[in-house]
Amino acid sequence: MLRQTLLGMSRNDQLRQIIEQAPVSRDVVKRFVAGDQTPDAVRVAGELVETRRRVTIDYLGEDTLDPEQAAATTDAYLQLLGALAEAGLTVDGTVEVSLKLSALGQALGRDGHRIALYHARSICQTAANVGTTVTVDMEDHTTTDLTLATVRELRQDWPWVGVALQSYLYRTEEDCRDLAHEGSRVRLCKGAYKEPESVAFQDAGDVDRAYVRCLKVLLQGQGYPMVATHDPRLIEITSVLAAKAQRSPDSFELQMLLGIRPDEQLRLAGSGAQMRVYLPYGQDWYGYLVRRMAERPANLSFFLRGLATR
Ligand code: FAD
């Protein structure tokens, strides 16, 4: 019911205009989305870097069924990387980019894989030219195999290409084993999509326990784990497991979303941990926030809690 209402909201243009233009929404959205334009993303990234946080930037736009839109998204990334380099923010991967293959055309029929790979390659080449990295987000389970295949191809030229894995999928512990090799950057998150019982744990406790099992595999492995969660228990467990695996603070990082637990982000960065903030920007913020909530109604309380916390 809530899901249908939210999906209806995401497609209602009149409602969209009212919400987009209301001053209160701009204030709320500013908390979670850096702005509409490239300079907004560069400015907010610069502010985060000044407070010892690293950044990964996501240009909003997903599920593209239009080849021109996929090309425009790619251009936006190329422009962004150029602007970040000009601002001196890409050195040593301080600010990198995150991308969704569906935004680069992965769903464009039989040629989708090839088109998304082509666009991702040009983003990776530009990132390499300016000294930074790229991480590929993970989307719903129907795309997991294709996304991992694309990452494998990209890694042949750019071994630093990172990929996200979702602990709610039964398969993920095995994927972690496959990807825990030297130089392999893996972002571990719980997973944000509504997935069926046939492929994913439904119970929050099971998802958390799977997260810890995956963490163990990644931290004991030779790769570079990126621990993406706001969950205080999992962050505590990460520090215990990292110490046990004799990991130095620069051999893994913690990641959180822009606007969620900002005080904790600062505390962790100040304590010597590597902290990276996932920063979305772009004109598609309305669809982004509302669809995230519709995919998983728990996301509604997730963002509302984000507003209540510092
Ligand atoms: P939750 O189970 O949502 O929360 C656990 C606990 O964390 C809460 O009990 C509370 O103590 C604390 N907490 C959580 N939210 C808040 C809040 N708003 N305010 C205060 N405390 C809070 N998902 C994908 O499917 N694919 C991706 O590629 C992907 N990339 C991501 C990248 C990053 C950097 C991050 C942080 C998340 C990403 N996600 C991705 C989303 C992720 O899968 C989860 O949906 C999201 O992070 C919520 O899970 P959680 O681990 O924070 O824990």
Image (cartoon, helix red, strand yellow):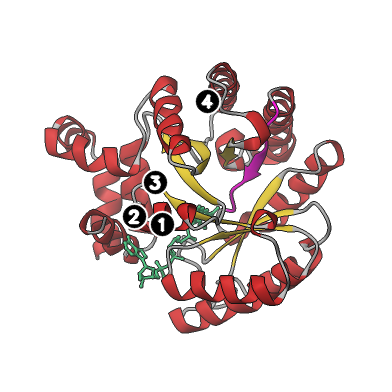
Q: Earlier in the sequence, mark 3 or mark 4?
A: 4
Q: Amino acid at mark 1?
A: Arg
Q: Is residue 211 visible?
A: no
Point out the frontmost of discs 4 and 2.
Answer: 2
Magenta segment: 131-138
User: What is the crowding at mark 3: few (fewer than 14 residues within 10 Å), some, or many (at least 20)?
Assistant: many
**Circle 2/circle 1 CB separation < 8 Å:** yes
Question: Which residue is depicted at the point 37% across and 63% down?
Answer: 296
**Image quarter of residue 230:** bottom left
- Secondary structure of the residue carrying tag 4 is helix
Alpha carbon of mark 3 to alpha carbon of mark 1: how far? 15 Å
Report the disc number at residue 263. 2
Q: Nearer the viewer, mark 3 or mark 2?
A: 2
* Quadrant of the image occupied by residue 159: top right
On residue 258, which mark appears? Answer: 3
Say which amino acid is labelled 3.
Answer: Leu
User: Which image quarter is the N terminus in?
Assistant: bottom left
How dense is the environment of label 4, judged by Cα within 10 Å: few (below 14), some, or many (20 and up)?
Answer: some
What's the residue type where badge 2 is placed?
Asp
Mark 2 near ligand 1 (CB under 8 Å)?
A: no
Give amino acid for label 4.
Gln
Using the image, tell me which numbered label, if any, was put on residue 69: 4
Q: Residue 207: x and y, percent?
A: 52, 77
Foreground: disc 1 or disc 4: 1
Question: Alpha-carbon distance for marks 1 and 4?
Answer: 39 Å
Q: Nearer the viewer, mark 3 or mark 1?
A: 1
**10 left or right of 52 in image:** left
Image mark for residue 267: 1
Q: Earlier in the sequence, mark 1 or mark 4?
A: 4
